[in-house]
Image (cartoon, rainbow, N blue to C red):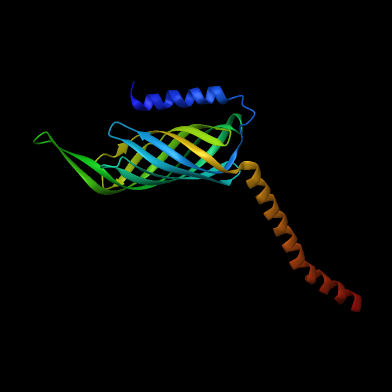
Amino acid sequence: MPVHYRYITLVLFLILVSGSSVLAQRYGTSAGLRLGSNDLSRTVGISVQQRVLKNVTVEGIIQSDFSRNSGMHILLEKHHPIISKRFNYYYGGGFSLGREESFIKNRDTKEITQTYGNATTGIDLIGGIEMTIAGTNISIDYKPNFNMAGREEFFRGQVGISARMVLVKGREQDKKWRKKARDKKRKNRKSKAPLFENLKEKFKRN
């Protein structure tokens, strides 16, 4: 069985087993490992996710096969619950920078020239499912990459599996956001108070 299919099977099993867990929780910030696989290479990387809006996260990925392909990716992702807020599907897109191998086809000689160390830039799309359980966020995704510069191939796809530790729970982040909103309202009320007091005094004099 290909490695990336094993990744898929493992994640689906974990999601099915953990679907009814009472320990599951949402996340605000999470970070951990990501394993990637495509026809060319297997990569190991770091994935960090930060919720920036109610159902929107920014994900940063740094990954490498420690040989010919390394990359950095920044992705904006929209999340939608499937069963609950702990079990989601998500999709999004972003940008990538990397050092990659490339295969140049010579149609006249029917030869393929392989190069590596090419500085590349590209556009990423991503779609996946995730489950958060017992302080760990587990996800599986498919991330196609469209080359803009530095590589002969225009399209490369990658299957990835990530296991991230929840550093900030969703409830904790929501609490901080509500406190920040309340503090902002109080500050605005205080800044407006002197103006109303001055107007009140002015009317009293008249």
Q: Residue 17 location in percent, x, y?
A: 55, 22
Of the pair 46 and 149, the residue shown nearer to us: 46
Q: Quadrant of residue 38?
A: top left
Instruction: Residue 206: tell me if it is visible.
Output: no
Q: Residue at x 86, y 76 (%)?
A: 202
Q: Residue 191 location in percent, x, y?
A: 74, 67
Q: Residue at x 54, y 36 (%)?
A: 136
Give the residue at the far left of this rendering.
109
Give the residue at the far bottom of this rendering.
205
Q: Residue at x 48, y 33 (%)?
A: 139
Q: Residue 150 location in percent, x, y?
A: 26, 48
The answer to whether residue 2 is above or below residue 144 is above
Q: Residue 75 location in percent, x, y?
A: 45, 44
Q: Quadrant of residue 167?
A: top right
Name the side, left or right, on which 100 lies relative to 4.
left
Give the residue at the far top of this rendering.
1
Of the pair 3 and 185, the residue shown nearer to us: 3
The answer to whether residue 140 is above or below residue 62 is above
The answer to whether residue 201 is above or below residue 59 is below
* Image quarter (top left, top right, bottom left or bottom right) of the N terminus: top left
Of the pair 110 and 21, the residue shown nearer to us: 21
Name the side, left or right, on which 53 lies relative to 96.
right
Name the side, left or right, on which 108 lies relative to 63.
left
* Image quarter (top left, top right, bottom left or bottom right) of the C terminus: bottom right
**Number of callouts:** 0
Name the side, left or right, on which 148 lies relative to 171.
left
Q: Quadrant of residue 10?
A: top left
Instruction: Residue 20: tell me if it is visible.
Output: yes
Q: Residue at x 60, y 37 (%)?
A: 26
